[in-house]
Amino acid sequence: MSERLMLRLGAIAALLASIVLSQFVFVQSAFAQAAPHNLLSQGKTAIASTQEGGLSAAMAFDGNTGTRWGSNFSDPQWVMVDLGAVATISRVVLNWEAAYGKAYQIQVSTNGASWTTLYSTATSDGGIDDINLNGSGRYVRLYGTTRATGYGYSLWEFQVFGTFGSPTELLSRNRPVIASSQEGGFTAASAVDGLANTRWGSNFNDAQWLYVDLGSSATVSRVVLNWEAAFGRAYQIQVSDNASTWTTIYSTTTGDGGLDEITANGSGRYVRMNGITRGTGYGYSLWEFEVYGNRSGGTGSSAAPSSVRSSSSLIASSSSVAISSSVATSSSTAISSSTVTSHSSSLPSSSSVPSTDQCSSVLSAPTGLSATGVTTTGLTLSWTAPFTSVPPCNATGYRVYQNGALVASPTATNAVITGLAPNTVYSFTVVAINRVGASPASAAFPVSTDGDSAAINFGTNVTIFDPSMPQAQVQDKINQIYARQRDNQFGTPRDAIMFKPGTYNVEIPVGFFTHVIGLGALPDDVHIVGQVVSYPVLPNNNSTQNFWRGIENFSVTPPGGGMLWSVSQAAPMRRMHVRNNNLTLHYYGGWASGGWLADSKVDYDVGTGSQQQWMSRNSQWGSWSGNLWNMVFMGIANNLPGGTWPGSANTFIDSTPVIREKPFLYLNGSNYEVFVPALRTNSKGLSWANGQSAGSALPISQFYVARAGVDTAISINAALNQGKNLLLTPGIYPLSEPIKVSRPNTVVMGLGYATLTPTNGNGVLEVADVDGVTVSHLMVDAGTTNSPVLIRIGENGSSASHASNPTVLHDIFVRVGGNGVGKAGVSLLVNSNDVIIDHTWLWRADHGEGVAWDLNTAANGLIVNGNNVSAYGLFVEHYQEYQVLWNGNNGKTYFYQSEIPYDPPTQDQWRSGAGVNGWASYKVADTVTQHDARGMGIYAVFLRPNVFLSRAIETPTSANVKFEHMVTVNLTNDGGIQRVINNTGDPTPPGIAVQTPRVTKYPQ
């Protein structure tokens, strides 16, 4: 460069500096000498490559050393945390479980897509790894490459320490830049202009370089290279104080293009990308070359503020030097480009033109992400451009990231995404690019692709049989499942067994958390020739703990004396046909405490024997024999048993007022569909007596098929927000937030006792106050942190009428404790009007792990605030206050079974008011003016002496608040129930069912 030119440019720079400095005062931020160790990661959003069972990523960041993340048993695996903002990372602490990582890396990223490794080891020995670091990013990741054991990677806690706010600034934007060569019009200045659609390109040979003059010495902490397709395979990042002697601060021989985000440590005025080996046959090509760090003091300044911006580029060759320079000042003038060759002794005069280029900041994040045209393999993603009042700051392009990887760089506010897998949730973020740089990423937007109707992945916990399979093979698999589930009362396995239409000569023993399903359009389409049996769990043929098992939508021709279905709570039998034989609901006289039969047909007799209570709805049989404490028959057209209350335990309700039968999965040819029956009013008998009932067949493509260990509340809610229905396959679903249903007529359907459990005191399911939602076959386990409400139907204060299209809940089961400590205020809260509860068991555990008065705490099972709510088959047990609190008007309960809590420590610790022993099991609020309840059985099993319940039922006394057929039973020698309803009904004396007081009607 000629001395005259250097002087000319120096004079211009000095003049501009004096103008700017005379009008602005710059305050330099001060940073601490060393970043303090503040814990940044606890409770933040976490994602993992895989999850073993219920060991979710969130558990590594919950501050609880009794919970952990566990991966699948393979390499590599990763877990990352989103700190919510860029932070300076000074320390990471890994608290390994026995399954630790022998070789792993700690990585950081600002966008969740490109990663910089801050720490690496191949010799970890587990325990606690306390690692000091120096880097910055919003996302921090453990990337495991080699496991130390045959298991996965498992962390009790992953703690990230540091301070929020990056102590670095972008130093290179619009600074003078020099390149070894230039291809065509792809100037060096284009690599530092902040524009996504301009680039520097070199000649087509290896030894090429590009360096930027920062203006003064600076500490360099990070370099970002945004490669065009022609990238560098081997290159160095170098610094210098004089642009002649270079120090290498980073080197690679394995560059793969894309975005290289490099954490470096060096200082100098000049920073160079020194290319050694190209990755393609073209040259080196960079969209952007960004240098971040801190000024070391001196004459230089950081990237100029809006009042001053400069750019220069030089291309060095043997014959000439080309210089382009533009400087804008607060006086809104610009210097146009000038060209000087090596033999020139003069510089053409510059022309002065107005400048409105006042952009000095990146845009805010794009918003309003949405997806249209969703198919099994693709979609169109759209978003809203960030607003700016400065036109030069408008977006010039966007970057679209799919699960953290860059997949598109459009200039418009939409992108067509292809190559996706069916029934999969993808997370998209979008970054806006303007001349200053890249915006923050948008909020993650999860999108579910459609399912393939003939090739649905139901996961490993669903077993599907075809009649063409060898019967011995089918039987062997059934036996394997039963061996796993026979004693699995509080374990994690969940199973669904599904039979395609046809005949099978097998025996099906049904254990805990097993759901046996026929895939025919009608029950007789699947025919089991053999026994379908629930064997007693306890000695002496005792089935009082035969919980959580179900059968539906197939027919059985049992051997010998008939089918043996000896069960207690949460064991529904729906849409079944017992052909040419009997159905026995006990096991050779052993105790049983069921039960539920709906929309089913038994050709011969139903024998209850020692069954304590039973609810039958809309079913058909040849005859019914037996009754003990509380038998309710609703919508049964004929062959009802004889006897009337109180001489017998039978309650007859002529027809079912209103019901929509439970949706069911079936095969239409080779395609899976879900049939949603239509609403019926005042119905009797089977819905399928004359073939398929009225209703709607929904293709499985309209469902998001969720899988435990893969899906989270985020992915599930994303699918629901797209208008999908939801099918939850068997397994445990830890949820950091509730599943939220807001679209009318949504179907939420579980298989195999799919189990939802909260991770941080949240609820697990919230249904908006809308028409026609159907929720079926779900299990809920309360978490260790108290959840005020586990399931909520309708918002507080809901007032809309849904009489013509009510929300219906089928087979909803809640457990608080038993599998460990669980806590919940209310298990099921119904705020909406007209809701139908069609079989539920809400259970505060009386046995198992984590069971004690002050451990598995739970106030109420069911609270009803909505009007016109109906409950058919309501089982609620052991809660510490009212089992049921009914505040809404015109409620109906047809069949109620309840044990009050076993474990009040003393009477004084269990009172609902002065002089009132305990809390009534079934409480109708004083403000209620209309209510109808029939077939009510309430039992006491007090484990400590001198504990009593004043009354089993509390209700206002009114002609329109009506109760029929109530019984109380004491099952221990201690305590008892003093009145059945209000002050009516005899007390239960000590002893096991010595006397069972009955009240026929209240008011009399």
Image (spheres, rainbow, N blue to C red):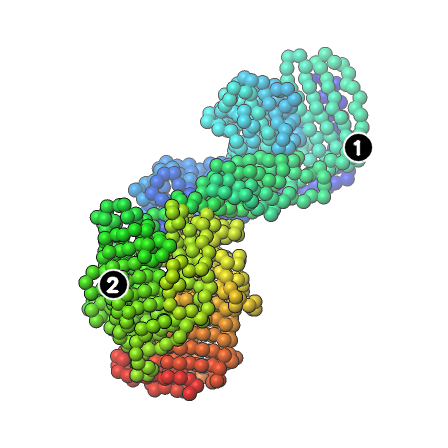
Name the amino acid type tagged 2: Asn
Residue 539 appears left or right of 977 = left
Q: Residue at x 27, y 45 (%)?
A: 468
The residue beneath circle 1 is 354
Q: Pointer 1 and pointer 2: residues touching (CB < 8 Å)?
A: no
Asked which secondary structure carries label 2, the reply is loop
- Relative to 259, residue 974 above or below: below
- Image quadrant where residue 175 sits: top right
- Checking the image for residue 580, the label placed there is 2
Asked which secondary structure carries label 1, the reply is strand
Name the amino acid type tagged 1: Pro
Q: Residue at x 52, y 50 (%)?
A: 722
10 Å crowding of disc 1: few (<14), some (14-19), many (20+): few
- Relative to 955, residue 849 above or below: above
Note whether residue 159 is visible: no
Give coordinates of residue 67: x percent, y percent.
38, 54
Q: Nearer the viewer, residue 179 or 646?
A: 646
10 Å crowding of disc 2: few (<14), some (14-19), many (20+): some
Residue 306 appears left or right of 938 = right
Q: Residue at x 26, y 74 (%)?
A: 625
Q: Total number of numbered labels?
A: 2
- Image quadrant where residue 822 sits: bottom left
